[in-house]
Image (spheres, rainbow, N blue to C red):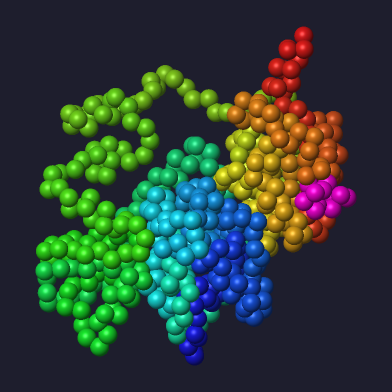
Amino acid sequence: MEKMLLLGDEALAQGAIDAGLSGMYGYPGTPSTEIMEYVQRSKTAADRNIHRKWSANEKTAAESALGMSYAGKRSMCSMKHVGLNVASDCFMNSAITGANGGIIVAVADDPSMHSSQNEQDSRNYGKFALMPTLEPSNQQECYDMAFHAFGMSEKYQIPVLMRLTTRLSHSRSGVLPKQPLEQNELKLPEDKRQFVLLPAIARKRYRILLANQEKFEQESESSPFNSYHEGSDKTTGIIACGIAYNYLMENYIGTQCPYPVLKISQYPLPRNHIEKITSECDTVLVLEEGSPMVEEMLKGYLGSCLKVRGRLDGSLPRDGELNPNLVLQAVTGKDVDVLSVPQVVATRPPKFCNGCGHIDAYNALIEVMKEYGDGHVLSDIGCYTLAALPPFQAINSCVDMGASITMAKGAADAGLFPSIAVIGDSTFTHSGMTGLLDAVIENTNMVVMILDNSTTGMTGGQDSHAVDRLVSICEGLGVDKDHITRVVPLKKNHDEMVKLIRQEINYKGLSVIIPTRECMQTLKRKTKANK
């Protein structure tokens, strides 16, 4: 295959297309913009029907990409470094939900602030989230890493962060492409509750993430993008990260660098390589774009000869709260009963309040969903998330505020039918409106149910900005008036709700159903106050 002359951004985009990309999401921001623009211009992407529309913001982009991953297909979202701040809610939680189809979060940093308000280093987000991170050193690696990242993402069911910088994003080089891969088939997760981050599930998912850290480190040790180059002069060893390796090599064109060099383009740090270069050399020079992340970590490795104990060596648990008994065991080394609560105290799972309108809304939805099977309802954060628990078990996601609509959109883009979003009235006005706007622009074939209890119920019944505004907001965003329907969720209206939900599922486009009945708790308080 012939070489292509590509920007770093374009090389990553082409690599993702050739690696079986099904959906590209993003928000423009220098130096990342060209990633999406390349996919949008690509004839191959058009022929393959790859989704490639701009999102309302970086948060909705990340959530839609996660929704397509949920549906089993390979997706990528792109943004500049400060955009990752906007997407960080989804980004951090997606490390715990994990992935189904491969997903890449592509972030372009801007050292020297050529067009940005700060110099933040996105590798710190990867370290913070305990997520594998790739940092290409040249355009060929930008291309090749797309294949590698999707493969790793699906192998370990984890999103992968790809960090570029300005000079790499906006410089060109020859790139040799690979044989393209076919797109994934639609496939829902084996664990239908994997993406529901209720605490009981999230704790289990977090332990899986922690258990995989050693495997991620082993992947870095054997990665083709991390390499150790021997040198005869051991007075100095050089650790060069990402494009900094290119900067180093440009000083030794036609000759060999006399010092041992450890090239790092995949994180977490390859500990064996680090130990090798630090044991062989008198001094280590760290070359890295952005913050001194690796340098600080090295000082943590090497700054003291004292044995360090704590959560990392198992003296204390890596997850969960501490308590006096755990501390006593760590201090004395003696076995202590470390239960934080007496066994006599029984747990009580949360449930809907008696008479809650959400119960009637879900009963109608559950009846309709029997015709399609499990795995079609993407939900959100609020009282209605309790539908993940028995006896309902009606929802398949709870990731971050507003993610229901955008994940349902991404799943619909991937071909999932029907795709249903369930969101509360308060959450909708918090961060659901932008996702609905994305769906309006494309008239996405999906149903959005806004469960309106006229309050912020889960947090104690605070006033909701959505009261008496939901229909006008939806109309203002562009939803077809004929497909915005209010209904009162009561047992006597069950058949009416079932008929309405079924009708809107069969409509080829975007529908909004608003089951509206005031929260029982706020109604009780109002009634008492009036008396």
The reply to whether residue 27 is visible in this rendering is yes
Query: Residue 516 magenta-drawn?
Result: no
Q: Residue at x 67, y 73 (%)?
A: 49
Q: Residue at x 45, y 85 (%)?
A: 174
Q: Name the residue nearer the viewer: 63 or 283.
A: 283
Q: Quadrant of residue 70?
A: bottom right
Q: Is residue 330 left or right of residue 77?
A: left
Q: Is residue 281 above or below residue 431?
A: below
The reply to whether residue 63 is visible in this rendering is no
Considering the whole magenta stretch, tell me its main secondary structure. Answer: helix
Q: Is residue 7 left or right of residue 36?
A: left
Q: Residue at x 69, y 41 (%)?
A: 429
Q: Is residue 342 left or right of residue 229?
A: right
Q: Quadrant of the C terminus?
A: top right
Q: Name the residue nearer the viewer: 87 or 337.
A: 87
Q: Name the residue nearer the viewer: 338 or 443.
A: 443
State the extent of the magenta-drawn residues as a range: 474-484
Q: Is residue 328 above or below residue 51?
A: above
Question: Where is residue 284 shown, x and y percent of the image?
Answer: 18, 63
Question: Where is residue 387 shown, x and y percent of the image?
Answer: 64, 37
Q: Name the residue nearer the viewer: 272 or 466.
A: 466
Query: Residue 476 magenta-drawn?
Result: yes
Q: Residue at x 33, y 41 (%)?
A: 318
Question: Where is residue 101 shown, x and y percent of the image?
Answer: 54, 62
Q: Is residue 218 above or below residue 521?
A: below
